[in-house]
Image (spheres, rainbow, N blue to C red):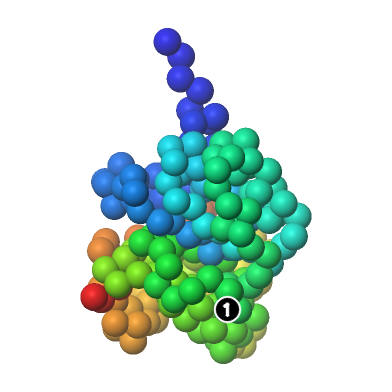
Amino acid sequence: MTTDLAALFGGIDVYLFDQLLRGRIAPGMRVLDAGSGRGRNLVFLLREGYEVFALDPNPTAVAAVRDLARRLAPALPETNVRCEPVDASTFPDACADVVISNAVLHFALDETRFLDMLRGTWRLVAPDGLLFCRLASSIGIERLVRPLGGRRFALPDGTGRFLVDEAYLAGLTEELGGRLLDPIKTTVVQGQRAMTTWVVRKGS
């Protein structure tokens, strides 16, 4: 029997898939994608009956996620998918056991905006819940990026991003009252950009 893995898992981030394999995202959990885009990380969760929530400020992306939910989880309330920014979400505090922030926070235009987005995301995480975050960093490409101000940098790939580093993430983990579940891991893509995985457990 041939299994269509793309149909089963969609375009799920491989590092998020790792959290699934390790049992950290388990059936019965409430999972919220804070900056869902078109829902590439939600295909498996919707198909398997997780209680899914999503938000994104782009109405086209929200429409795509709602369409995905209608096909894969028709019982999911439409209000579980909302068109709103992460720092001004109408979802209640501590509403999700797992909150996904995948390639979202590095679009912040300055540190104030970054912290607003991060705190807006963190407040959605339930006590003892999990924040899974993938974001751009300077780790491993420190000499290849050019500062633009406000922790924004020009990358060799031609983009401008808000970049974190290991010390900054460690400080944020402590400030939020969380604890690292995994060591901070970074993938450097041919000297063009670096993406870091930051997985944090919220204190009870």
13 displayed left or right of 203 = right
Q: Position of residue 116 (x, y in %)?
A: 54, 84
Residue at image location 26% in from the left, 68% down from the top: 128
Q: Position of residue 2 (x, y in %)?
A: 46, 14
Q: Residues within 10 Å of mark 1 (few under 14, many from 20)?
A: some
In the picture as drawn, the residue positioned furthest to the top comes out as 1
Number of dots carrying numbers: 1
Regarding residue 140, the answer to whether it shows in the image is no
Q: Position of residue 179 (x, y in %)?
A: 25, 73
Q: Amino acid at mark 1?
A: Asp
* Mark 1 element type: helix
Residue at image location 36% in from the left, 61% down from the top: 97
Compared with residue 196, is residue 142 higher up or lower down, i.e. above or below? below
Residue at image location 32% in from the left, 66% down from the top: 129
111 displayed left or right of 127 = right
| Residue under pointer 1 | 87
In which quadrant is the N terminus drawn? Answer: top left
Q: Quadrant of residue 182?
A: bottom left
In which quadrant is the C terminus drawn? Answer: bottom left
Regarding residue 175, the answer to whether it shows in the image is yes
Query: Front-most of 166 and 91?
Result: 91
88 displayed left or right of 61 = left
Q: Position of residue 66 (x, y in %)?
A: 66, 49
Compared with residue 42, is residue 60 higher up or lower down, i.e. above or below? below
Query: Front-most of 189 and 184?
Result: 184
Residue at image location 62% in from the left, 36% down from the top: 71
108 displayed left or right of 165 = right
Compared with residue 108, is residue 63 higher up or lower down, i.e. above or below? above
